[in-house]
Amino acid sequence: MKTNRLYRIFKMAIAAFFLCFLRLFRRFTKLKNFPEAKITSDIPQAVPGTRPEDFKMETALELDGEKIETYKRKDPVSFEPDAAYSDLEGIVTFRGNHKRDGGSFGTADVKEEKLEVKWSYKTGALRKSYGKGFWTGSGWTGQPLIVRWNKEMREQMNISSDKEDLAEAIYATMDGHVYFLDIEDGSETRNAVSYELPFKGAGALDPRGYFAVSGAGDDGPGENGAARAVFTSLFNTSKLYELGARDPFAPRIFHGYDSSMLVHKETDTLFQPGENGIIYSMKLNTTDGGRKISPSEMLKFRYTSPRNSEEKYWLGMEDSAVFYKNYMYIADNGGNLLCIDVNTMKLVWVQDVVDDTNGSPVLSIEDGVPYLYIATSLHWTSSKILRLADVPIFKINALTGEYVWIRSYFCNTVAGVSGGIQATPTLGKGEIDDLVIFPVARTPQVRSGILVALNKKTGEEVWKLPMRRYAWSSPVAVYGKDGKAYIVSGDSDGRLYLIEGRTGKVLHTVELGANIEATPAVFENMIVVGTRGQRIFGIAIK
């Protein structure tokens, strides 16, 4: 909803006053722990409080255009938690894999613990399909993809560079282009591809390196601008396929494809959630060494519940799915976290995560038990006038859907620009294996935020970094050759931080000049990230 700028400033001033006033009388953070469930099986199953019927959920299936009552996948899918999602060197989907616990590749050779901007690349703008505005730069979640191609693959592609150790960034941005850049100097490695669709979410590569999928977050201009997910061949950058658009099976009018797809390479099966309320699945039938796909067994799963509507608690998924074996976990705009058996497309359990969920869940295996970390933005649950509320961060048992702990922060939303957690957390490894790290927006003041490290077992705060401006960008953990952990995180004022992972101490910052909504990707010592200021940056960790 568009609002007058002076009115927004007035609302922010009123909210700022009340936030200062309320700090005298209430805690801005709370923690609630729940009794640990007794695990008797490693197969996800509903318990009282997480049964789909408790939420009055209804589902429907369509296979190759025909509605069906039941389904059984011919080639069963299983994403094993310890298996590599891809054998490619790099970051090939949002947060790297089917657990969404990555975002960086390799280790960094860190000596000075400083950041240095090495290059920038100019991007453009795309007129919106409504009003007079433009989509500009790289938006939320906007993570680039980075791959170091081996010689065999490189020689089959239309890459202009002959560099032996080329690491290529593939970046879909909101000006409707997919860009191909050398991460070392920002030079073009291929001609950009234009689709005139606002690519707001992170794209994804086929884990074998055959194609890229870029999802439009909204309609583009013109009669053929319906939002959809577009498949681009990485051999010749031609369009291979597209899905979505104005799908008549969709339970929601609005269509968007911010979710970053996943492919089960062993069975050649793709999964793409949509903001239209559909989860798409299909056999790719890849041939000719990856140059051709002939999709079949197009399966569509949709759901409805009494809480969801076109007006509030919207249907549809903006976050990216997590997989544990043959179970998909994904949350929606209406505060539902779903566990789905993708081999039968049956809803296993549902949990209430309260509000609009934009950050993706992250899967963590702890003492042999799968858990999910997830948080929400502040939308439906805020107070009507001042738009204030406690925003929850959850640890959830992935087998039963039960809460383990909930840590909440008191936040504000102004004129539809969300407070709370828009980002996906960083799951610590190595020396920070006990930590999960979240950015919380619009707390304790309307323009500020915090970056908080929570103990995974208890939900207690281990460290908290006050940020002068809030962040929607997801933090990325980077590990030095000596095992030291660092966090790379951007804020809405264009500041990129290098942070000591164990303590939360800021080691260095660089100014990129415009809002960093997008999530960085890190390849060894190089960071690649775009801003709303129509620039992609390459930044070295020195």
Image (spheres, rainbow, N blue to C red):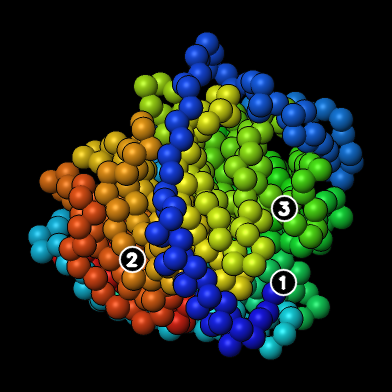
In three-dimensional space, the C-alpha distance between marks 1 and 3, rounded to whole angstroms, equals 21 Å
Depth check: 235 or 110 in front?
110
> What residue sits right under mark 3 in the picture?
313
In percent of width and height, residue 119 lies at 30, 78
On the question of residue 269 being in view, the answer is no
Earlier sequence position, callout 1 versus callout 3: 1
Residue 405, horizontal then vertical, whole percent? 46, 34
**For residue 302, which quarter of the picture?**
top right
Give the x, y percent position of residue 10.
Answer: 56, 82
The amino acid marked with disc number 3 is Tyr
Q: Provide the residue designation for mark 1.
A: 219
Circle 2 Cα neighbour tier, 10 Å, few/some/many (<14 / 14–19 / ≥20): many
Find numbered disc 2 in the image and state the secondary structure of the residue it sits on.
Answer: strand
Instruction: Relative to 20, say whether 352 is above or below.
Output: above
Q: Which mark, residue 90?
A: none
Task: Write down the quadrant of residue 469 in the picture.
Answer: bottom left
- Residue assigned mark 2: 467
* Badge 1 element: loop
Distance of label 2 from label 3 (alpha carbons):
30 Å
Label 3 packing within 10 angstroms: few (<14), some (14-19), many (20+): many
Tell me the quarter of the picture where residue 326 sits. Answer: top right
Name the secondary structure under disc 3.
loop
